[in-house]
Amino acid sequence: MSVLDENAAILSGIEADGSDLGSPRRVDFAHVFPERRAADAFAEAATRVGFEVGIEEVDREGDPWDVIASKTMIPSAESITSVEEHLGRMAQEHGGVPDGWGSERV
């Protein structure tokens, strides 16, 4: 299953639960980093291209830094996949990896 198909299936489930996917909502894209400096660099880069960003250290073996890059958007499989891939490339440039996405159900 491709990432696009996987995102379409997730959104289909969200819609089946009664959420209106035609309305803009905040979508959070998670990334993990091995050190604070790398997390900060990614956060700065994501902020420059229009994302709201939060950084948190978590108690986890390896990659203890979580960075959530959020954007208000109308969720579609295509738009989420595009953003996910773009941010994933940015995270990798800074030594991190993507860790999924989520959105509140509205």
Image (spheres, rainbow, N blue to C red):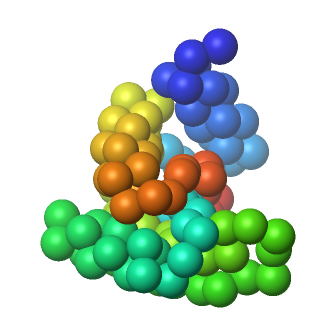
Question: Residue lying furthest left in this view?
Answer: 48
Q: Position of residue 35 (x, y in %)?
A: 55, 77
Q: Is residue 21 left or right of residue 59?
A: left
Q: Is residue 44 above or below residue 78?
A: below
Left or right of 62 in this view: 7 = left
Q: Which residue occupies the foreground of this view, 15 or 69?
A: 69
Where does residue 11 sit, x and y in percent of width and height? Answer: 60, 37
Image quadrant where one finds the N terminus: top right
Residue 69: name its quadrant.
bottom left
Please provide percent x and percent y for residue 61.
82, 70
Residue 106 in sight here: no
Relative to 16, residue 94 above or below: below
Q: Is residue 104 visible?
A: yes
* Residue 7 sits above or below residue 47 on the image: above
Q: Picture quarter containing residue 66?
A: bottom right
Identity of the residue drawn at 81% across and 74% down:
60
Considering every residue shown, the one lying at the far top of the view is 1
Quarter of the figure that contains the C terminus? bottom right
In the rendered view, would you say 95 is above or below 5?
Answer: below
Q: Measured from the top left, where is residue 103 in percent x and y?
A: 58, 59
